[in-house]
Amino acid sequence: MKIRFNRRMFTMMLLFSALNVAAVLVMRTGFHAAAHGVEASRSALTSSDSEGMLFPRESESREVRELGGMWKFRADMSSNRNAGFEQQWWTKPLEQTGPVIDMPVPASYNDITQDRQLRDFVGWAWYQRSFYAPTSWKNVKQRTVLRFESAHYNTIAWLNSKEIVRHDGGHLPFEADVSSILSYKVPNVLTVAVNNTLTPHTIPPGTIQYMDDPDRYPPGYFVQNLQMDFFNYAGIQRPVKLYTTPSVYLDDITISTDVQGTTGYVNFDCVIKGNSSAVPVTVELLDKTEELVARVKSSGKGQVKVNDVKLWWPFTMSSDPAYLYTLKVTVMGSAGQSDVYRLPVGIRTVKVTSTQFLINSKPFYFRGFGRHEDSDIRGKGLDYPLIAKDFNLIKWVGANSFRTSHYPYAEEIMDMCDQQGIVVIDECPAVGLKTKENFSNKTLAHHKDVMTELVRRDKNRPSVVMWSVANEPASQLPEAEYYFKTVIGHTKDVDPSGRPVTFVINQSFDTDRGGQFADVVCLNNYYSWYHDMGHLEVIKYQAKYNLEQWYLKHHKPIIQTEYGADAVAGLHMDPPMMFSEEYQQEVMTNYFSVFDQFRQQYLIGEMIWNFADFMTAQSTTRVAGNKKGIFTRQRQPKTAAFLLRDRYWRLANQTGPRNTEL
Ligand code: GCB
């Protein structure tokens, strides 16, 4: 992505960042979380790093309850965005603090009303709702946890006026044990404040810019500058859940799998909490039909052996793809009370050579997409019909993979990938690290925390075959070398299963300093789009030269993680012109011819940008958003979708049995 600011703004930004003014300005209004001591007291209240954060799944010992629906909502429009803290809005019904509206959870709040100010709001947004807790939960032998699947970006939550959790960063879950705070027979009041401000040290980074010229701007006027090409949707975007566990419970489980001949191995390592001495753990592996395959009793660590193993294969690589076993873990607590957790497990191996990406020792070619969580009205809000539709479209096209560009996607989406055999490059939200400040030690420390949280969340997923620690950083800067060595090294340290790690590069092969640390080289480029505009004939030369040079430099396999062109659905021009459907197709066809030259060599995948049109900040290069989708934002196919479908199914038939009707 190119940063799209006009020259005046750009000059101002440079000036501001040179003087480190952005951070000061953030403090000036106090509307960033730091002003409320969030960062200082983080370790005390954020979900602790030692917690496992297993995805809440119902069982005979666990209940899960969603707190979805209409919440009360109020954006703090005060000039310093601090009225909510000054007046302690969490201590009273939100409607007593001023005007409130109904806000759906989960959803981004931006596109729910007709209010332009709310769409573009920057600062603290306040949510509140009440709920009853069943008296059956008032049990000393059980705990109740409140979990946010994600809220963007900084969050503070209070239950019954008591602060329970703070979290830095969107797209990843956080939770708090609320057993001792819940009330019974009276409503519990949950208040949540979410702040979407991006600063040079958030991930993704951004800047706040004050327009201090009183002749041209109203007093106190500021804007949020983004360094990424998607709308900064905000709010409680994924489900909020209450779940229970027994007081002695499975806090975490880490698995890794291996295959030798026809035998599969599942190594497991459980973390049990709530008891000071070791408790017995029974681990059973069940097949798809719930038949017992193996049972192991241990103190939490061990291995399950599977004869005649059924491997987890990607979609189209087997007639029975995405085979999932269930690892049933039973923790024997005191007084006969046990905790049961069922983890879906796919047995597969991943290996990278200098020219190939091997899944179960077979070459895997990524036929995929860059995507976004994005749709009309709900923004980045989780939406089951949309998820189902998207997976149907992914399979209709014959794709087998996507990258979670440019942040971790909802766990409900990741479940679908595991279940349907859609392979994932799992990307963290570090998009747009562009300035020296973005590579500071402070950002680096936060970036490492984010990678720890991401790996902790997705480490057991068979669909996740590689981590991406960033998208298009300024990897030519000297600071980038140590930075990427460290973040990639850290990611390898926290993932015991040894998945490959990468980041996505848009710098030139002769200036980039980070690619040396990546296991796979992931490249984005937009020939005949952001330069040589309209000159489709250059693609073949430039794409070929680029792939050759990168391979010569690193001798590592390469994925083309982005290429493409905007097309306004229904705009036709022949001969093709930019923004027409024909131009998008021509760009694709030209890239395809280069991909075909390198597919049998070291090119291990192609991912078009983008699956569907998506919303961005407003700019002269964006027509109500980015239009590089092969589907519209409403998921209708452009002509390009048929072209891609034709290609992806043809490639699929070359690499394995097709397993669906066309
Ligand atoms: C990129 C970015 C992506 C943008 C895309 C574009 O390189 O990774 O976030 O949306 O270019 O369309 O400019």
Image (cartoon, rainbow, N blue to C red):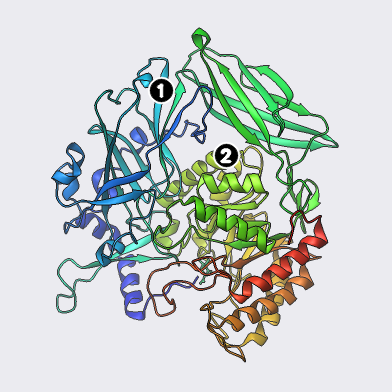
Type of the residue with mark 2: Val
Q: Which residue is mark 2?
A: 494
Q: Is residue 578 above or below residue 28?
A: below
Task: Name which quarter of the figure residue 532 lies in.
Answer: bottom right
Label 2 vs 1, first from the N-terminus? 1
Which residue occupies the foreground of this view, 23 or 563?
A: 563
Question: Residue drawn at (16%, 52%), measured in percent from left and top?
Answer: 99
Going by the picture, which residue comes out furthest to the right? 261
Q: Position of residue 520 (x, y in %)?
A: 67, 57
Specify the label residue 339 is tagged with.
Answer: none
Task: Name which quarter of the figure residue 270 lies in.
Answer: top right
In what quadrant of the picture does the C terminus appear? bottom right
Q: Which residue is mark 1?
A: 143
Question: Residue drawn at (76%, 41%), measured in percent from left and top?
Answer: 311
Q: Position of residue 449 (x, y in %)?
A: 46, 43
Instruction: Tell me the distance, in whole angstroms, between the alpha carbons under discs 2 and 1.
Output: 28 Å
The verdict on label 2 being within 8 Å of ligand 1 is: no
Q: Is any atom of residue 135 visible in this view?
A: yes
Type of the residue with mark 1: Arg
